Image (cartoon, grey):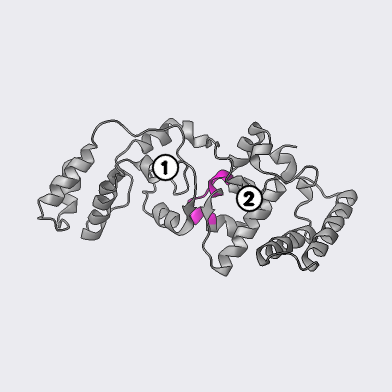
């Protein structure tokens, strides 16, 4: 069953009976008193999804990890933009503010523990279940190649020194931020993103905000098949020289440095 088919799947009478059966089993497991609080929480969430008929599109197959599914189908699902799914607009807005535009970009995201965020996470979890995937198991399959990974314009942006893609103002703090990135070994834009693995959503939100609107970059990007340009980064050499010229203090003339380097 394709991703498109799942999104437009109509709940039949037979499937509603299956949902009722699943709800009954889930309720029995909760009441037997042998489950940990975490297991009970998961079962209660599953029971709610069953009652809302949100799992109907996934009933035709087993809920599993991506490793157990066809690779082409997983690539298709992970490459969907959230705006093309049934995810609620409010949740889409929340993810967009953190730079998550594609389904695969939310895999490995460490969510904010606030109650309001937990509701958003549950909505995303339900979306994955509609596709027949367990969100908790999704991080075990990290071979997804994002559709933008082969885009020449995106790859050209990854190759740019970080100072060319960030919103930097003529302030000491912003130059200190740029210097700090270079000092940590983040010389090029592509080095600001994760290759795969986990990422705190609060950190990702801050990162998403610093990119220039015309950079073509978003905070949730996953870098695939890219290596930074070889050799020492010219921008880092220039930043070091300007920093040292101020006797280790944050420079007062960032605009002058920027004009010398990029204008």
Which quarter of the rendered picture does the C terminus lie within?
Answer: top left
Confirm whether residue 262 shows in the render: no
Q: Residue 37 versus residue 189: which sits nearer the camera?
A: 37
Snapshot quadrant of residue 237: top left
Q: Where is residue 110 in the image (x, y as percent from the top left)?
A: 51, 56
State the extent of the magenta-drawn residues as a range.
95-106
Residue holding disc 1: 216
Callout 2: SS = helix
Residue 151 within the segment the image draws in magenta: no
Q: Is residue 105 visible?
A: yes
Q: In this view, does 120 lie above or below 214?
A: below
Tell me the SS state at disc 1: loop
Specify whether 29 is left or right of 161.
right
For label 2, count other residues whose C-alpha is less than 10 Å away and answer few (under 14), some (14-19) or many (20+): many
- Vertical order, 177 against 153 (above or below): below
Circles 1 and 2 in contact, beta carbons < 8 Å: no
Q: Residue 135 carries which label?
A: 2
Task: Kindly identify which numbered label has been placed on residue 244.
Answer: none
**Quadrant that contains the N terminus:** top right
Q: Position of residue 118 (x, y in %)?
A: 59, 64
């Amino acid at each position: 069953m394709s991703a498109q088919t799942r999104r437009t799947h109509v709940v039949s009478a037979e499937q509603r009976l299956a949902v009722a059966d699943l709800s009954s089993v889930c309720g029995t497991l909760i009441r037997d008193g042998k489950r940990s609080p975490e297991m009970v929480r998961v079962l209660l969430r599953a029971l709610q999804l069953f009652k809302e008929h949100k799992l109907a599109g996934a009933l035709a197959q087993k809920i599993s990890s991506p490793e157990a599914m066809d690779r082409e189908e997983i690539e298709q699902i992970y490459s969907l933009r959230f705006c093309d799914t049934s995810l609620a607009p409010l949740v889409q807005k929340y993810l967009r503010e953190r730079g998550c535009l594609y389904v695969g970009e939310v895999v490995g995201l460490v969510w904010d523990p606030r109650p309001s965020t937990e509701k958003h996470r549950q909505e995303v979890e339900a979306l994955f279940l509609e596709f027949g995937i367990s969100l908790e198991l999704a991080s075990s399959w990290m071979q997804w190649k994002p559709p933008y990974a082969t885009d020449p314009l995106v790859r050209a942006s990854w190759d740019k020194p970080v100072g060319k893609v960030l919103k930097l103002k003529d302030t000491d703090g912003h130059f200190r931020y740029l210097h700090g990135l270079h000092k940590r070994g983040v010389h090029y834009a592509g080095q600001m993103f994760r290759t795969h693995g986990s990422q705190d959503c609060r950190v990702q939100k801050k990162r998403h905000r610093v990119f220039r609107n015309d950079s073509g970059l978003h905070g949730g990007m996953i870098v695939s098949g890219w290596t930074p340009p070889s050799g020492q980064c010219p921008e880092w050499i220039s930043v070091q020289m300007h920093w040292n010229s101020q006797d280790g203090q944050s420079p007062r003339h960032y605009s002058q440095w920027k004009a010398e380097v990029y204008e």
